[in-house]
Image (tube, rainbow, N blue to C red):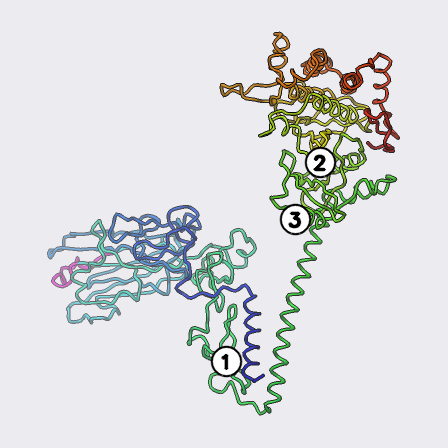
Amino acid sequence: MGPQVLVFLIRFLFLFLLLSWPAVVATSSTFPIAKPHCKDKCGNISVPYPFGFGDKDCYRDESFRVNCNSTFNPPKLSILDETVVQELSFQGQLRVFLGVITDCYTKSGQQTDTSFNDATFFGFNQMGNTFTFSNTENKFTALGCDTKAYIVDSNGKNFKSECGMTCNNKSDVINGSCTGIGCCQTSIPKGYDSYDLTLRSYKNHTLVYDYNPCSYAFLVDKNWYNFSISDLLDFTRNVDEYGFSQVPVVLDWAVDNKSCEVAKKDQATYGCGKNSYCVESKNSHGYICSCSHGYEGNPYLPDGCQDINECKDPKENTCGSINCINLPGSYNCSCPLGYHGDAKKDGTGCIPTTQNPNQVIQDTVGVGLGFLFLVISILLVLWALQKRKKNKLKQKFFRQNGGFLLKQQISSCEGLDEAAKIFTAEELRQASNNYAQSQILGRGGYGTVYKGVLPNHRTVAIKKSRKVDENQIEQFINEVVILSQINHRNVVKLLGCCLETEVPILVYEFVTNKTLFHHIHGEGCNSLISWDNRLRIATETSEALAYLHSAASPPIIHRDVKSANILLDDNYTAKVSDFGASRLVPLDRTQISTLVQGTLGYLDPEYLRSSQLTEKSDVYSFGVVLVELLTGKKALYSDGSGRQTNLAVHFVTSVEEGKVWEILDNQIVTEGCREKLQVVLELAERCLRLKGEERPTMKEVAMELQGLRRDQTQPWVALNPEEGERLLGELALPHHNTVEYNSLTDEALMSLDGGR
């Protein structure tokens, strides 16, 4: 490997390291001067921020608002009281046109023109004291050979300056000289934002009329005005639309009238952007901003100061473009192969090395490996910091979502470790293929459900919930603990949760055959579920709700019973799901005051009116599901005229009018026994009564449907009162050390040990 190749590798590694640094390299032609989407020119005058016109966001405040009048050609830029602006700069100065005051006479000594000749005011103090007349760039100037002129501070700051001149002959006046004969100039103090001009005559110009009929006084940019003898006869400059002469005056401006020390304490109003620094205004009012060394641009924009590429400007670097490497705010130079030293020193910086070639190669390899080690070390540190940040965020969410409370509950409940597993965020991310869109099973009011496969090949449903109210974390954890203990064949099993994310994630068993809503109303389904299956689904759903109301401890009100929350497996076995709106009922209460939640069409009218949630609210919602099974219609459906019809109201009205058989699904009428259908219709009507006290309990509903199914599958067995009482008693499990009862197999399945 030759030395040239090694040098190339070193430079490549060094450039790689530099490219990882978030520096922005720009040339002066690309520097923005105005905010995005704001105009930066009025005619041929540049308008840098904090100045601007148009939207309020384009200028810092009203004192920096300018007006661009496009009716003039070229357009006229003005500030405040139509003061015409000639030039704006973000270096803290601007040039405006201000008036010239005159005092003119006839040959006989009569005044002919007294334009602004008596205490004429010029000022910008109404702009918040951020604009002052530059004491270094302006001169107070008076013209005339019979003249006395005064400039006085209009705010009474004890400043007055005077020019008085007489000259008997025109030959006494020197062209280009403004030292007191025909032309007088004097300086103004620092920090003044307003002044008065006064102009008078000694002899009414009668002695000098032929070459000087008028006196003139004005403040002017010293670099603009050069006295000429002809000005004594007629001084007319930059005449405005009213016929008055104007001259350019330099103003110093500050972004705010605070000192740098005070301004930096309030970052919300601090005017300097990145890569800039604060400078006290040279005219004693406030501060201005300047780009840091190695940066150029508008320092008042958030990202206005941008890195310049010194390597492309021979005036900025001394090492030439070949060996120059640009850095943020600076640059670096490297000596050619065989040389060493300070490459930034012109001429004598790089000196020949006395080392032998082998030593050069060794040094080169060492430097290259050093850079490579540095790059790898930086990447490892960044990776470790990122991982640490993620772990801290996970711990924060775990604590915020009640993770420690859940662990405490698990450790205090015997046998709960397996029932309420706490999953990691990474486990569920991998199980759901990073929550891919293709894995979405459905969306609801309480979150999005994804299909996932755990490492043990078990298929699950992963529900990303909406954000949990931090004030109700304890209740949320209690619900997770209790729901995870439910082991009813007709309730979707909660397997565990993940609390390492901003919103909790719940993991349920996966049910394969979509929802009851899909099979009744879904596209292509056409309500093809048989009467036997419909009756069985209704029975299993009622058993699950009766279990939640009567056997769980504490009791659970589902609060969102609907066909979309009843899942079906391949055998059409019903599984009640989605407990996002469920509430736990204290053992000493029968109703709960709560904000109304649920789905329109299924909501209990009494609950909607009173906000008092009871078990009978679930009975009403189940009644709507029962009518869906009977009619094949949605809870809210279109009646053909474009209006929505409430199925529950329509059903009750049809019962009262004796027309209920007309709205039943034809398949039900064909397959079902009329006597049993009549019993189910009457049961549905009782579930949908407006007063909750007139509705049956879910145990009574379940018992009645069980009797119909038993009578249907074993028609030779009659459901006598004693049998009914026995079934009812079996559903009414005790609140502690309860067991789950499967009414179809007449078997006790599992002890819940005080859970549900």
Residue 208 lies in the magenta stretch: yes
Label 3 vs label 1, nearer the camera: 3
Task: Estimate the x, y position of residue 227 in percent, counting from the top left.
Answer: 23, 67
Dot label at residue 344: 1
The residue to which callout 3 is attached is 433
Residue 556 inside the magenta-drawn segment: no
Q: Amino acid at mark 2?
A: Val
Q: Residues within 10 Å of mark 2 (few under 14, many from 20)?
A: many
The earlier-in-sequence mark between 3 and 2 is 3
Q: CA distance from mark 3 to mark 1?
A: 55 Å
Question: x%, y% of residue 24?
Answer: 49, 64
- Vertical side of 251 occupied by 173: above or below: below
Question: Of helix, strand and loop, which one carries label 1?
Answer: loop
138 vs 689, left or right, is left
Image mark for residue 511: 2
Q: At label 1, which amino acid type do we have?
A: Lys
